[in-house]
Image (cartoon, helix red, strand yellow):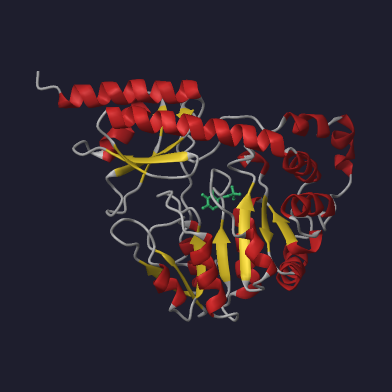
Amino acid sequence: MSFFFLDEYEDMEAYIPGEQPKDRQYIKLNANESSFPPSPKVLEAVNQSQINGMGHYSDPHCMELRAAIGEVYGFGADQVFVGNGADEVLGFCMMSFFREGMKVCFPDITYDFYRTYAKTYHLDYEQIPLKDDLSIDVEDYINTDKDVILANPNNPTGKDISVADIERIVKKDPKRMVIIDEAYVDYGNESCVPLVRKYPNLVVIQTFSKSRNMAGARIGYAISSKEIIEDMNKIKFTFNPFNMSSLAITAGTAAVKDTEYLKKCVTTTIETRKYFEKEVENLGFFVFPTTTNFAFIKHPTLDAGKITKELKDRGILVRHYQNERISAYLRVTIGSREEMQQVIKELKDIVESALCVC
Ligand SMILES: *Cc1c(COP(=O)(O)O)cnc(C)c1O
């Protein structure tokens, strides 16, 4: 640490992303990325003139992209904020509306970034334990005076909350901000975006990183009331006005308009997930039901950490969590059919050689 680093950042906690080792080629199923390419419309849109245009600054208002996203969800551009991934959108949200000591709550088992931000911004945060079945107790979030952050469906469990329950949380107190992170909503879940029309204290965040197969492009967005979006833009213009590159704006606009392609990819991913879940069940795994692009599974006897390591030795990366409440589980992103066949082959081998008494 340098002489200049601020004391108040000393106990910040960095988010630890899924590893990206370069020592060999891996089947990478540890960060819920997609194995599909983005919509072919993206390649058409990001053409030579776009590349030549890089000499100029991008539109700081990102109007084209905000309007295109808004159109898909039935809102004007003034109700859409865009940023470098959902993570940055969440960051701007924190910067705009949360100051030291403010109260916020989220589950004990959820996307780790919420705690990272809560520490960075010195919030008074509470991590509310999930129930034993790894679902949230909705009453916990209704009967609290704290602002709320929930991933729906949750990561890494894949467990969802009904929109009716979210509405109960949101409408309890209009002075409480409720942030719903819908990173996985496209995989067969109902979105709470329509509630934005009724409740100006609701912020819904989504991303292009999962269902739109564009994690590397870094595009995320928030849909909320005009006032909230205006505030976030005000903060953005004090920090990084050109937060989105011209390439990301163009690529994102082309991608979000191609709703057919989104549907096709999502359908295939769900089919592949069901196939994978059935196969691992046959190998003796317990499958936690999810509606996402990942499977959450555990073996009754084999150690999940060991399986993770064995898979890595065989060129497959999956995610394993140290938190003891979920340390028996593996989170396996659903890749292509061929990738999942390979995972099943290796898992079968690992299970059979571990259980063999020879
Ligand atoms: C993957 C994920 C994100 C990150 O989205 P980016 O747009 O890549 O920053 C946010 N929230 C949850 C719950 C996620 O799983």
Q: Residue 212 is drawn in which quadrant?
A: top right
Above or below residue 355? Residue 201 is below
* Residue under the point 72% across and 53% down: 73
Left or right relative to 119: residue 86: right
* Residue under the point 72% across and 60% down: 81
Q: Residue 304 is drawn in which quadrant?
A: top left
* Residue under the point 73% across and 29% down: 40
Could you tell me residue 146's position as x and y percent?
49, 78
Left or right relative to 1: residue 286: left
Above or below residue 64? Residue 32 is above
Report whether residue 24 is seen. no
Could you tell me residue 179's position as x and y percent?
57, 65
Above or below residue 147? Residue 133 is above
Could you tell me residue 311's position as x and y percent?
34, 28
Report whether residue 268 is seen. yes
Could you tell me residue 298's position as x and y percent?
29, 40
* Residue under the point 28% across and 59% down: 132
Q: How many marks?
A: 0
Could you say which is closer to the camera, residue 354 or residue 271?
271
Q: Residue 246 is drawn in which quadrant?
A: top right
